[in-house]
Amino acid sequence: SCSSESHCAVVGEGYDNAGNYKTVGYVTFDGGNTWTPTLTTQDVGLMGVKFTSETEGWAAGTSKSGRNLLGQFYRTTDGGKTWNLEQVRLLF
């Protein structure tokens, strides 16, 4: 998701060199010339990210707890420099 031509965020998931599952969110402020990892977790599979303004954005995903899926939502208010877990919701 991009809030402007130079400011964008992406999320991806996979395995690191040690074989551990990992999800990472990256942000660029220079049109994609450089990307900085600003959200890293091993507990959530992030499915998408969306900026609602230049400073506010949301990343959404799920995690599994037993037989339950948990919807988890991260929010940024500083353009993606930092992310905070805002809501965990039980899905059936």
Image (cartoon, rainbow, N blue to C red):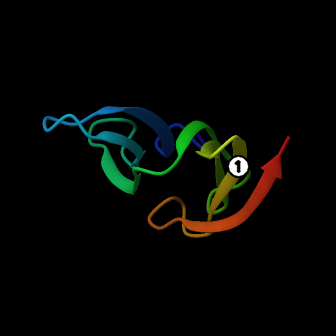
Extreme residue toward the right, this view: 92
Who is closer to the viewer here, 14 or 50?
A: 14
Q: Give the residue displayed 50% in from the left and 59% down from the top.
A: 80
Locate the N terminus by quadrant.
Answer: top right
Residue 9's x, y, as percent? 50, 43
In this view, the residue in front, 26 or 4, is 26
Question: Residue visible at 48% across and 37% down?
Answer: 10
Q: Position of residue 77 (x, y in %)?
A: 62, 69
Q: Is residue 59 left or right of residue 28?
A: right
At 48% across and 38% down in the image, what residue appears?
11
Query: Residue 39: x and y, percent?
Result: 42, 56
* Callout 1 amino acid: Leu
Figure check: 57 above or below 49: below
Mark 1, Cα crowd under 10 Å, few <14 / some 14-19 / many 20+, is some
Query: On the rendered structure, is 68 left or right of 25?
Result: right
Compared with residue 20, is residue 87 higher up or lower down, i.e. above or below?
Answer: below
- Where residue 61 sits, quadrant-wise, is top right
Asked whether residue 3 is in view, the answer is no
In the rendered image, which quarter contains the C terminus? top right
Residue 11 in sight in this render: yes
Check disc 1 and report the residue beneath it. Answer: 70
> Which is more toward the observer, 20 or 14?
20
